[in-house]
Image: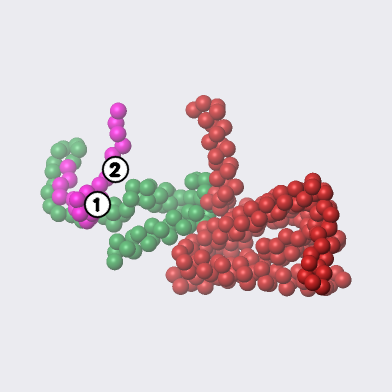
Amino acid sequence: MTESSTTSSATKRGFLWLWNPFTTTAGGTALTAGVLVILISAAIAIPSKTHFDGVLDTHLGFAAPSWFFFAEGIVNWLSLAVVLWITGLILCRKEGRKFRAIDLFGTQALARWPFLLISLVCLIPGVGRATTALAKLTVSSEGIPTFPKIAIGDTLAFAFASLIMLIATVWFVAMAWKAFRISCDVSGWRAVSAFTISIILAEIISKLVITELLIALV
Amino acid sequence: MNKEKHFPVECPSCREHLEVTKLRCAECETEVSGMYPLPRLGLLAADDQEFIVKFVLASGSLKEMAKQLGVSYPTVRNRVNDIIKTIESQSA
């Protein structure tokens, strides 16, 4: 095998791993790597005040103590992992199968790695400025919006960041599904429906918990 | 060049399970004729049989299998579940 074909097959394996790492990585390894990724994403989010204020949500906004950013990441992970764990138990009990909780929790943690991309892209200075400016959008009593002045560079940065946020969020949902499918060995319409309901439930739970944390902060 | 042989299990015409009608001793050339159903494990695909052999050699440890195959524990366990389903459907 030539050096270039070895490099290209290694690159291909790397991309495949990023798309679906769970065929090779689960259990304690996934848990350690996943929690590290969640904490690193939170740490990178602090300077740009990027809040992952829900399982699927990202907002740039207010300054908060560092622990709050870490707490958001952990709450988001656990909200979905606990709901999927219960869902998995219900689905598997019907078929008399079992699965390991550490695989479920670990793969769900690792599935959150696309949010690292969001943390990184929100560091672009123009993104924060554009978000702050957009927050000053006003609407007159006749319903006519007054758009604040935003520099072209900031607008482009914001548009780019928004695109990355969308892609990363969709990527995360796909990863979370694969993690659930492989950890619990579920498939078919029943599993997809259960997963969809679980993610909506987890989003609600994470929002409630983070709101409570916010109230405690204030 | 010796090509790899695969033990045929299914009839190429009607897809029913094949049966053994003749066995031969390579040492003394004795031949045994009759009608013998294939053993249950023999009805599985070659890669499933290979997996089961490795599983037994790993003392039935899914963790050990995962390490040997370079895949995650749930991937190995899911493979076992698939083989269980295949065996159960053959028994049905």
- A109 left or right of A45 in image: left
Residue ID for mark 2: B6
Q: Residue under circle 1? A: B10
Coordinates of residue A83 in the picture (x, y in percent): 61, 70
Asked if residue A97 lies left or right of residue B46, the reply is right
Give the residue drawn at x 26%, y 55%. B39
Residue drawn 30% across and 34% down?
B3
Q: Residue at x 29, y 64 (%)?
A: B91
Residue B24: horizontal and vertical position, in percent? 17, 42
Q: Which residues are magenta?
A: B1-24
At label 2, which amino acid type do we have?
A: His
Q: How many residues crowd around disc 1 within 10 Å: few (fewer than 14), some, or many (20 or more)?
A: few
Chain letter for the residue marked with disc 2 in the picture: B
Chain A colour is red
Q: Which mark is residue B77?
A: none
- Chain with green colouring: B
